[in-house]
Amino acid sequence: LLISLSLCLIDFHWTPGIPPSKVSPRGVAASLCLSFGGGELTDALHFIERHPAIIPYLALFAAAMATGNIFIYKLQAAFGALTVTTVTTMRKLISVVSSVLIFGHTLSPAQWIAVLIV
């Protein structure tokens, strides 16, 4: 559901160098089709109905996703695709290594080799 809702923020026909600043009608249509077609929307609404305390967390998560999308669009416009790819790869690497260090998760030897390669 959250992935399909984030589609609403994406304008599929934006001009390079200018981040989208409006809700895309195509994104809304795709979101509705994905949500209703898979039954995820009703499941999500029932979950929220049973656990209303989650609403502020959902709003915070949605705001963080929207803010992240804006930064990615601006980064793409200012520096290009290679920089976006490098930044997102490093973000994921830092996330994985932090998960190992903070939460004690483990990586296989092959995964550690991949970390070292990145």
Image (cartoon, rainbow, N blue to C red):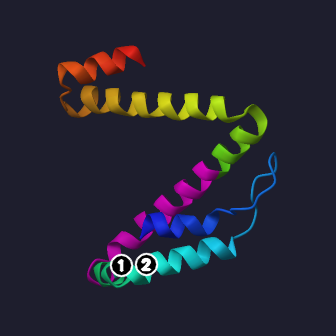
Q: Residue 38 carries which label?
A: 1
Q: Is residue 63 magenta?
A: yes
**Closest to the observer, 63 or 18:** 18
Task: Reply above or below: 14 against 116.
Answer: below
- Horizontal and vertical percent for residue 71? 66, 45
Please name the amino acid that badge 1 sits on: Gly
Label 1 with label 2: CB-CB less than 8 Å: yes
| Quadrant of residue 76 within the rendered picture | top right
Label 1, residues with CA under 10 Å away: few <14, some 14-19, many ≥20: few
**Closest to the observer, 16 or 67:** 16
In the picture, measured across the screen, residue 38 lies left or right of residue 78, that is: left
Q: What element carries label 1?
A: helix
Identify the image quadrant of the N terminus.
Answer: bottom left
Q: What element carries label 2?
A: helix
**Closest to the observer, 64 or 52:** 64
- Horizontal and vertical percent for residue 40? 35, 77
Q: What residue is rendered at 59% in x and 58% in y?
A: 66
Alpha carbons under labels 1 and 2: distance apart: 6 Å
Residues shaded magenta: 48-69
Q: Residue 35 carries which label?
A: 2
Q: What residue is rendered at 51% in x and 70% in y?
A: 5
